[in-house]
Image (spheres, rainbow, N blue to C red):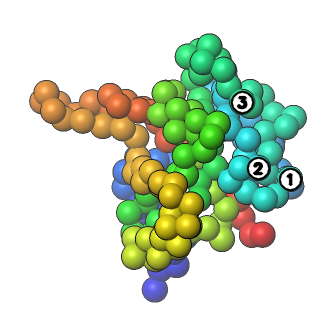
Amino acid sequence: MATARSSFESSLEDVGVSVTSVETASFREQLDETVTPPAVGVPLEEAFDEPSLSLADTSVTGDPTPATLREATTGVTGAQLGIGDYGSLALTPTDRASELVSLFVDRHVAVLRESDIVPDMDTAIETVHDEIDRTGHSVILATGPSATADMGALVTGAHGPRDVHVLIVDGE
């Protein structure tokens, strides 16, 4: 039987999303190899209570301004959950406009802890339900690069990033 992670990685491949696994100790180096400069990101401390998962000492500019966001090629955000059977990411909007960082760039790099991969949508909804109910916040479910076929042929990047990459931080 497939694990949630193997199902997630297979589903990501099906929707055209690349994946890299990384140990916490080499996270910053791998992040720098994964982004295409110029890169902006929201502080990962908002998504993870782990100092080792930080944009500090990387090529990613934290707390982007409207100008740096317009110039950016890559946006880096934390992902709350990975959903195995769809290859979807649950992205939590933040006060620092994480949704803009994930949508207004050509390449979105989502950082996800291995422990935050769930097998299916039912488990994902159960996981975020109490938080949404308690805080009134929302969750964005993103599956692969933006695409549309409204006008005929499939076009990627029409309403968001053309390329999505998931950086899975192993173990914890």
Q: Quadrant of the C terminus?
A: bottom right
**Left or right of 132, for residue 59:** right
Disc 2 to disc 1, C-alpha distance: 7 Å
Q: Which label sits in the foreground, 1 or 3? A: 3
**21 lies above or below 104:** below
**76 lies above or below 126:** above
The answer to whether the residues at label 2 and label 1 have Cβ atoms under 8 Å apart is: yes
Q: Position of residue 130 (x, y in %)?
A: 53, 72
Circle count: 3
Q: Position of residue 78 (x, y in %)?
A: 64, 49
Label 3 sits on residue: 63
Name the amino acid, label 3.
Answer: Asp
**64 lies above or below 56:** above
- Is residue 104 or residue 4 the one in the foreground? 104
Residue at x 60% of width, y 18% of height: 66
Residue at x 86% of width, y 53% of height: 51
Mark 2 or mark 1: name the one nearer the start of the chain: 2
Residue 51 tag number? 1
Numbered disc 3: secondary structure: loop
